[in-house]
Amino acid sequence: MTWGKGCGYLAQGCDEFTDLDLSHAIIGTTLKVRLLLYTRDNVTCGALMSHTNLHAHPQFNLSRPTTFIIHGYRPTGSPPNWLQSITEMVLFREDVNLIVVDWNRGAANVNYFKAVENTHKTADNLTAFIQKMQEHGASLSSIHMIGVSLGAHISGFVGANLNGSIGRITALDPAGPQFTGTSKENRLDPTDAQFVDVLHTDMDTLGFREPLGHIDFYANGGADQPGCPNTILSGGAYFKCDHQRSVFLYLDTVNQTCAKKAFPCSSYKEFLDGNCLNCDLFGSVGCPVFGYDITKWREVLLKFGQTKTFFTTNSVSPFCMTGYMVDVVIWNEDVRWGYITVKLHGDDGQEAVANIDHKALKFKRFTETKLFAQFDKDIQLVKKVSFKFSTGNALKPRYKLRVLRLRLTHLEEKKRPLCRYDVILEESKEVTFRPIPCEESNF
């Protein structure tokens, strides 16, 4: 790939995203929409687009696809801290016209309701620009809008204005306040584009709870994200961390840092219980993988209408996790209840941990208990395995879990399951052993 110098238009000056501060937000800003164009010839140097004279920008090639990046509410007026990353990553992946929609004057306002009002006006502005593109030969099918928070609904309004003809809308944690409970004309919905994919990360506060696209991904259940503060004592991060995580999860997929397989399921609880791990519904393509490349599943997803899926992540990038099915058969006479922690050890000193503690698990004699274990790393060659059983009750006598068989099956790769037979787990004591390939037998 041949790259430009990044700032090839410095002679004319680089145009940057509007940088405001809290004083602007307190006073309130009047809407002004600026379109900053980036291409592989000017990756880091924005060119301010004319809304009417497209020929003024020789680097704007309408035979290429066009991607719009649309930010959301900016209560302090500062530019989004992810703008440069998403611009560079998308242009590395694909030769497109990338247009950053700068509506900071309009989004920067301590009065959130004013910013919401400006979403429709911003959408009308973008609609007129895209219609101008269409007049000059651009294909609406080749347009991809990536909208964050309020930007997700702006994308939807643009799509509706164009009768759902644009190719794709990606909605990253669409805003909930002032949109929840409204009709589909007043929010994003699946008819707004030929394909709509949605990620939910903060549905209990700033995000939207219900499905809005052809496929909706709920990361870690769609509400609280790992590594984000749980108390208001953490300041501003408490309010924005879960919401903003949507962008960073998406960036991981643009950058191809890791694949996040998502499983269709009716609820997060059913997903954690391991009841939704069958991907046969999607045929040879398997379960969808969240993110930039979801269009590989487009045709099969369009057949289903709306699909709700779940996946889990780590607390920092790379956010991907590795899933195993863990089967446990005990021979205690009495039923045992408790939690399991599993640790995988590689030959290079690496360790991966899975805590299966979302609910107390029931272990019954000669009955297979299936556990869905999600590890923070993928250990390619597992040398040792550690198990720990706990009841979570320090006041009762300590129990032993007499295990007839433990079996671990990798959910991503076609590896032979690993087993251990006849092991005793003393409560709250970690037991480490070398696994062996499973025998072909059932209990």
Image (cartoon, grey):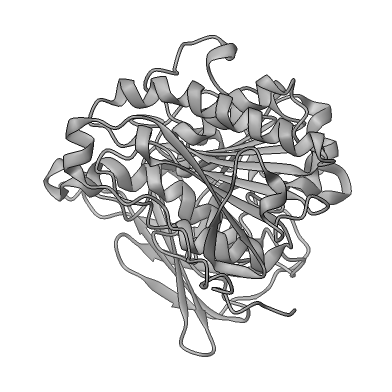
Quarter residue 270 falls in: top right
Residue pictured at 54% horizontal, 89% vertical: 347
Q: Which of 73/324 is in front?
A: 73
Q: Horizontal and vertical percent for residue 159?
A: 67, 27
Horizontal side, residue 350 vs residue 107: left or right: right
Question: In the picture provided, is 395 more to the left or to the right than 89?
Answer: left
**427 shown above or below 18:** below
- Compared across the picture, whether 4 is left or right of 229 comes to right
- The residue drawn where x is 63% and y is 66% is 256
Q: Position of residue 429 (x, y in %)?
A: 31, 67
Quadrant, the N terminus? bottom right
With respect to residue 342, does 173 lie above or below?
Answer: above
Q: Is residue 156 visible?
A: yes
The front one of 150 and 382 is: 150
Position above or below: 5 against 404: below
Residue 388 spot, x, y in % from top left: 38, 63
- The residue depicted at 46 percent of the width and 88 percent of the height is 349
Query: Which of the 4 image quadrants contains residue 75?
Result: top left
Q: Residue at the location (79% across, 50% down)? A: 62
Q: Farthest residue toward the bottom?
A: 348
Q: As drawn, which residue projects farthest toward the right?
A: 284
**Which residue is nearer to you in this view: 153 or 408?**
153
Q: Position of residue 239 (x, y in %)?
A: 26, 40
- Quarter assignment of residue 58: bottom right
